[in-house]
Image: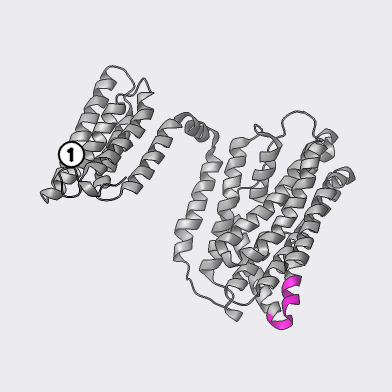
Amino acid sequence: MNIEYLSGSELEYLPQFAVSLGIGLLIGLDREQKSAASAGLRTFALVAMFGTLMALLSEKVNSPWLLAIGLAIVALMTISAHNHAAEANADPGTTTVIAIIICYGLGSIVWHGYSTLAIMLAIITTILLYFKTELQGISRNLGRRDLVSILQFAVLTFIILPILPDKNFGPYNAINPYQVWLMVVLISGVSLAGYIALRLVGQRYGTALLGSFGGLVSSTATTLVYARRSKYNLNIIPTATVIILIANLVVLIRLSVFSAVVSQSILPQLLPVLGSGLLLGLGVTAYCWQKIKPQHEMPAPEIKNPAEMQTAATFGLLYAIVLFLAAWLSDIVGSRGLYAVALASGLTDVDAITLTSLRLFEIGKLEATETVIAISLGILSNIAFKFGLIFFIGGSLLAKQCALGMIATGIGIGLGLIVFL
């Protein structure tokens, strides 16, 4: 919209009021649909424009108190309406009261040049108001253990991480406490998201989500859980196979995300290799999916909270050890030392060797090709280890079902190394 012709006229400020009007109508649209709400479209639109008007007047007369007085007026009116509704034994609409005050604030910041931010916050506010039922359902489905998990992750991120020194220590300057714990936070955050999603989904949404969320939390644990269950119930072997294969394919997506966060410059070399494994693995998984027969819902796996202090500290220690060994052996025997560490550490945890390789690449101790090969070897080692778990815990029948998908993923990664490196 060309508004240059308005400059210098009394309509110069019309665009700001138009934005405020739109914000008020957006938030009020949801409240209008609530029969119990004490305010609707007109009220919210007027409050937003009132916020812009008071901000304008406050700036023109150089008195910030006018803006505060406007807020006080809105607050008193909404509190009065709140009390009146409570006396009438109606829904007092506390959420509506807060929404009106937010609407006034958004109208105010529009005047001060934060229109984009105000629109974004208005959209977020409307989403929170509209999805009341879904948000309440999530809250009810989260137990005490889940809330503790979120609090523990907050401690890992906002208390422990900021106090750690961002300096290199030890031989080869390989250990940086801040960077080590940052990787712990990254792993814990992704795993916690999968853990909470798995707790919310439970049995309701089927094979694909169980495999996907299980892979986000721990593909090894998911493999172990369904291998055990299929051993005592042969009827679930086809479904368990697909869940295991999906969980292990999600690992490739996880590692791609980690790489994008830690070292974007490696992506042109790494993504084609991981993508090749993912495509071949998906092809076999889709074939196995077609053989699944309708049956009872599969229970979600009970997986340990990934944000527990002990779990986080254990991973941090493992990552630091792998980082030091990789730097040390790379210095002594070259890339062969790194590859040996990748094969060994990948047996139990592919995240550690992936983050180690990315860290060494970032500080200039590894070439891109060496980094991709090390990560690939860690993945292949991890696939072999989990196939062994399937065979010894789930039995030969489940192992035969999973073999094709896991081999296809490995072949895809191998072909990717040959073709793209």
Residue 144 seen in the figure: yes
Above or below, comparing residue 189 to residue 239 in the picture: below
Residue 225 seen in the figure: no
Residue found 70% across the figure and 65% down from its top: 375
- Residue that extends furthest to the top in the rendered view of this protein: 88
Q: Is residue 339 highlighted in magenta?
A: yes
- Residue that extends furthest to the right in the rendered view of this protein: 396
Q: Residues within 10 Å of mark 1 (few under 14, many from 20)?
A: many
Find residue 405 and report its horizontal and vertical position in percent.
Answer: 80, 49
Quadrant location, the C terminus? bottom right
Find residue 130 and report its horizontal and vertical position in percent.
Answer: 43, 31
Above or below, comparing residue 306 to residue 205 in the picture: below
In the rendered structure, the answer to whether residue 86 lies left or right of residue 273 reads: left
Quadrant location, the N terminus? top left
Q: Which residue is mark 1?
A: 70
User: What amino acid does circle 1 point to?
Assistant: Gly
Q: How is the image coloured?
A: one colour
Q: Give the secondary structure at mark 1.
A: helix
Residue found 57% across the figure and 43% down from its top: 196
Residue found 19% across the figure and 40% down from its top: 53
Find residue 290 and report its horizontal and vertical position in percent.
Answer: 79, 36
What secondary structure predominates along the stretch shown in magenta? helix
Nearer the observer, 118 or 402: 118
Residue found 65% across the figure and 75% down from its top: 366
In the rendered structure, the answer to whether residue 77 lies left or right of residue 303 reads: left
Nearer the observer, 3 or 109: 3
Find residue 272 and report its horizontal and vertical position in percent.
Answer: 69, 60
Magenta residues, start to end: 331-340
Q: Quadrant of residue 142?
A: top right
- Residue that extends furthest to the left in the rendered view of this protein: 61
